[in-house]
């Protein structure tokens, strides 16, 4: 998995802020809890200080067990995804990412 740093930018009023927009090109679509048929799609995750790249979505969005109001999705890196597709071997727990759907962007393939 690869990451790209997100750096704070200075506003005109002197305040620092971290841009939330995804990296430029290709087109990114933010995932939401109503998203369907997303398993296998390439995605990125936006954390507060970095973007996690080269990920694949492993599950449809679902309500988290401990907090039914928080919707999450499971992801893995490209290597684990290809092992799953070729050999049927599920990714191990250290290869999984469970992220809030608000942090996940699907890469739109043209």
Image: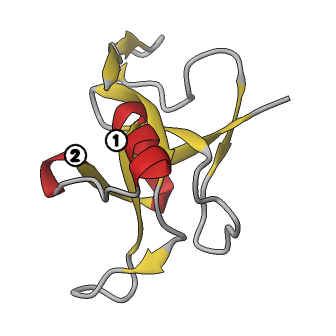
**Mark 1, secondary structure of its residue:** helix
Residue 68, above or below 110? below
The spot of residue 74 in percent (x, y) is 38, 60
Q: Quadrant of the C terminus?
A: top right
Residue 92, above or below 14? below
Q: Which disc is residue 80 wearing?
A: 1
Which quadrant would residue 24 be assigned to in this image? top right
Which one is in front, 36 or 105? 36
Residue 78, above or below 66? above
Q: Which disc is residue 95 wearing?
A: 2
Q: Earlier in the sequence, mark 2 or mark 1?
A: 1
Horizontal side of residue 44 vs 98, given as left or right: right
Which residue is painted at 26% across and 52% down in the image?
96
The spot of residue 27 in percent (x, y) is 74, 28
Which one is in front, 2 or 82? 82
Which residue is painted at 71% across and 21% down in the image?
26
Foreground disc of the pair 2, 1: 1
The spot of residue 4 in percent (x, y) is 36, 15
> Residue at the front extreme?
87
**Mark 2, secondary structure of its residue:** helix
Horizontal side of residue 3 vs 35, given as left or right: left
């Amino acid at each position: 998995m690869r990451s790209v740093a997100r750096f704070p930018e200075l506003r005109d009023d002197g305040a620092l802020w971290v841009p939330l927009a995804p990296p430029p090109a290709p087109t990114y679509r933010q995932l939401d809890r109503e998203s369907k048929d997303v398993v296998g799609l390439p995605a990125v995750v936006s954390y507060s200080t970095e973007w996690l790249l080269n990920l694949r979505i492993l599950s449809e969005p679902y309500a988290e067990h401990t907090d039914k109001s928080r919707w999450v999705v499971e992801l893995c890196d490209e290597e684990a995804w290809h092992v799953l597709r070729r050999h049927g071997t599920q990714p191990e727990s250290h290869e999984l990412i469970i992220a809030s759907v608000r942090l996940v962007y699907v890469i739109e393939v043209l």
